[in-house]
Structure formats: structure tokens, C-alpha cells
Image (cartoon, grey):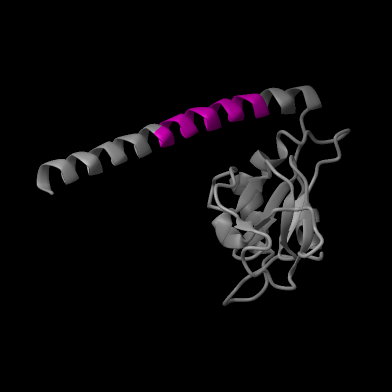
Amino acid sequence: FEADTSPLERFVAGEHMQTDDLKIRKWGKIGKEYIGAAFRSSFKKGQILYGSRRTYLRKVALADFDGVCAHTTFVLEAKEDKLSQMILPYLMHSETFTQHSVNHSKGSMNPYINWKDIASFEFSIPSIILQEKAAKIFQQFDKAMEQTRQHYESLRSFKRGLLTEWLG
């Protein structure tokens, strides 16, 4: 990856992904911020990013833009004939997957997991049709949670405004 010649505009570091939030809400701008040599994995919109450090933090995100990430963030895409891309991020947020990941992590100060250990995760797979139905239900939950988050932010902002207006 060459930042000077890349058409990509954004990079995602571990701190840009939030626990249990599939949405990437923060990112860095290529050319505006320093990115080190570890940022060499490009990703495309629709792919899944998985933070391989401190996997107990459950940093799994669905990319909604093209960008670049560090080699410590795995870029995943489902084999569509076996697993729906729509269900994969939810599977990776599951307690079963997280426990597998934590149990196979190495190191104590900054535990990490290797790709081969993630690939060894086994689970039952329903039909693609059922996977996609389940994913749509999970997406409805995500949409409701996002609306709730936006309402919370609006109320918080309104409260701050009132406090400023009334108390100076």
C-alpha cells in the first residue's frame, strides 16, 4: 500500500472500531494523518473487518466504504455458496465465536489470534435462505438501535443547550 499514490481516502485502525457496533463511525484520512507501515490491507465496501487484538472486545465492523487497515485487522468475506455475507458479522458477534476467539488467543499483555485459529471455528449452518432471513431480523434490530442512539444524542444535546441557556 502506497499512501501517496492510493485512490483510497480513509483508513480504519483498531480504535476506530467499537465493541459490539457493526458500524464504522470514525476513521482516519489518508494523506492527512500518519499511517504506519502496518497499514497494508485494503478492504472494500461490504467486507467485514475483525480486530485480531484483544478479541474479547468484539470489534467486528461492516465496511460501508473502501479503505485500508492494519495487518492486525482481518478482512473477511463469506463464501456465498456456503455462508451469507449478511449473517457473517452477526455470527462473529456471537458469544460462541467470541469464546472461541478468546480461548485461542495468544499472549497476555496484548492477546491476539491467528487466522488459522479463527478458521478452525466450527458451527452449524442453516440454509442460505434461513441465514438471510435471520440477518434481516438482526438488521432490523440494528436499525432500531441506531434510531435509539440518534434520539439519545439529540436529547443529550438538547439538555446541554438548556443547561447552557438557563445556567450560563
For the point 42% across and 36% down, the residue is 149
For the point 76% across and 64% down, the residue is 3
| Up/down of 96 relative to 159, above or below | below
Q: Nearer the viewer, residue 62 or 124?
A: 62
Name the image quarter holding residue 118.
Answer: bottom right
Q: Position of residue 32 (x, y in %)?
A: 62, 63
Q: Is residue 11 left or right of residue 154?
A: right
Of the 4 image quadrants, the one containing the N terminus is bottom right
| Up/down of 44 relative to 72, above or below | above
Residue 120 visible (yes or no)? no
Q: Name the outermost residue toward the left.
A: 167
For the point 37% across and 39% down, the residue is 153
Q: Is residue 89 left or right of residue 128?
A: left
Q: Main secondary structure of the magenta part?
A: helix
Q: Name the outermost residue toward the right.
A: 81
Q: Nearer the viewer, residue 101 or 154?
A: 154
Q: Which residues are magenta?
A: 135-150
Q: Position of residue 33 (x, y in %)?
A: 62, 66
Q: Nearer the viewer, residue 134 or 9?
A: 9
Q: Position of residue 71 (x, y in %)?
A: 75, 65
Residue 161 visible (yes or no)? yes
Numbered marks: total: 0
Q: Is residue 145 magenta?
A: yes
Q: Nearer the viewer, residue 80 or 103?
A: 80
| Up/down of 47 relative to 108, above or below | above
Q: Position of residue 30 (x, y in %)?
A: 68, 60
Q: Is residue 81 magenta?
A: no
